[in-house]
Image (cartoon, coloured by chain):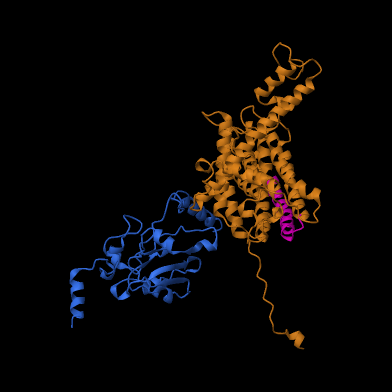
Amino acid sequence: MLGLGIVNGLIVTMKNFFRKPFTISYPEQRVLQHPRFRGEEFTWYEERCTACASCAKFCPLGIIRIVTHPSGETPTEGDSYAIDAFDIDIGRCMFCGLCVEACPYDALFMGSGFEEAKPSRRNLVITVDHLRAADKRPSTWFRPQLEAQGYDPHKGTEVTWRDAGREHFLYHVPQRPEQESSTATEEGKP
Amino acid sequence: MAFLEGHALFRNLYCLLAGNLDNTVACSGRGGLLPVGWEWLAFAITAFAITMVLLNVFLVVTMFYTYMERRLLGRFQGRLGPNRAGPFGLLQPVADAIKLLTKESIVPRGTDLLLHNLPPVIMVATVFVTLAILPFGEDTFVANLNVGVLFFLAITSVNALAIFMAGLSSGNRYAVFSGMRAVAQLISYEVPMVLSVVGVILLAGSLSLVEIVEAQRIPFFLLQPLGLFIFVVAISAEMNRTPFDQLEAESEIVAGFHTEYTGMKFGLFYLAEYAAVLTSAAVIVTLFLDGWNGPWLPSPLWFLIKVFFLAFLFIWVRATLPRLRIDQTMAFAWKFLLPLSLLNIFVTATLVLLLGEETATGVALSTGGLWAMAGINSVVALASVLLFARMVHLRTPVHPIPSMQPSPSEVA
């Protein structure tokens, strides 16, 4: 019957009228991101990084640039290369996370933030200083061990480099434990 | 001195200035502030005061209405609506006004400047002039015009001219399309609108809006349900509200006739569009919803409540209904509303003749007769609307798709 559809439509809109609006007023109200949300602002643990540049090799866009020099001591003793530059051009990053997957030492993590708007493209390049100063709130994407510890990037405290890895990665501890040093000397003896 | 019949405030102001010299106005014994022979100045000052008060109050109400419309439209669509400027977004109209006032007024090359600049003024003026005849409350009106209904109908049809001028002078083909649609649609909907008011005039026995309100012993929407329906539909087409907003159909013809208007000229169109909703609602209230009459509350407040209730209904319908095609709009006016309004006049006139009693001034109906008429008219309205809905097809005939094959005659 002509007209009944109009009445049905009016009822539908009236139902919407009394419903809570779907809008979230962004700066005041926020949608909580998932812990595995791949955000901007990479989290980088200098203590874990050996400057192997795996991330730069695996980046499909080639936007990670790492420049190193030998730090003066022998890498076999556990010393890493010294890092001159670690630039990530966020403006071209597609957040695929292959760099994080490639990192053998669990030193690079996706970030958890998304409010990194910058006034120009030049400012979108993240430098070493930027990475050092950034909050250590890594996304748990590809790092399920963080979730197993009950960590959520949007709540609680920051993660230190000791807690971030899959296992306790001991090569970079300045004072190496006795057990490991003793085995090394035993191997050297014969 | 027609406007002095209105509110006592203005009468007192005139008396204070001019004293008791004018025969038409009864004043206290004291002389006025102005010397004898300066009554014209008192008249001018009083008229200016009335106009200023009325226009400013109306503009503030319109500002509030634009906020209300956008806010309610948002709620109908499951969003919030403007809520940034000021508390709850209440200053949004002010922000809009500042923005529009500070914008550059761009005029396209090759336009007729007079034809381009006149339409916004005409649109606003036609809306504001309507205020002159509306009774806002008991004894609160500017002029008790004895042809008030005719005045309103005449003034609203000037809109078509203004829109066509705007469309034609813009030098934009979308604007021209809009102007053509305006001429077609607005003039078509004039006809059922005028005819649907005839029923009210038959019952009230007067063309003055003030007297029509006083004549409503029973609100006329009970006596004229069909007339109310036709009038509301036709007037919402007159002011380009959404089911009939082909003039500004943004998905078809950018913004229609005001595509090329910027700055405050666009602001005036915007203002006129929203102010027209309020004046149209006020006219509907006056003609059909018993005007300012109501229990307990003061009469201007009742008037405002009714007007905003109708405005709410307009917003509701706007949030619900999609836009019709232009051919559907025209078919609706000519095939559906026009026969129904003629039927309404016929039924009303017959009932007035049958149920009315001869008095000294003419034919009048008793209260019982009015209730009988309300019942009969409701049944007639429902039945005729349902019947016409079955009979009228708003669909256009489907034209056969031309075939690529040559016809037999061409082959031969």
Query: Vertical placement of A72 versus B383: above or below?
Result: below
Q: Nearer the viewer, residue A105 or B150?
A: A105
Name which quarter of the figure residue B158 lies in.
Answer: top right
Q: Residue furthest top?
A: B29
Q: Is residue A119 left or right of residue A86?
A: right
| x then y, percent, for residue A74 | 32, 74
Q: Which chain is blue?
A: A
Q: Is residue B400 left or right of residue A188?
A: right
Seen at 71% across and 47% down, the residue is: B265
Q: Is residue B364 visible?
A: no
* Numbered disc total: 0
| x then y, percent, for residue B211 | 67, 31
Name which quarter of the figure residue B400 lies in.
Answer: bottom right
Q: Which chain is orange?
A: B
Quadrant showing the N terminus of chain A: bottom right
| x then y, percent, for residue A60 | 46, 75
Query: Vertical placement of A61 versus B246: above or below?
Result: below
Q: Nearer the viewer, residue B267 or B300?
A: B267
Look at the image and give the residue range highlighted in magenta: B170-194
Q: Nearer the viewer, residue A1 or B169?
A: B169
| x then y, percent, for residue B80 | 49, 49
Name which quarter of the figure residue B255 lies in.
Answer: bottom right
Would you say the magenta stretch is mainly helix, strand or loop?
helix
Q: Is residue B180 magenta?
A: yes
Q: Is residue B393 magenta?
A: no
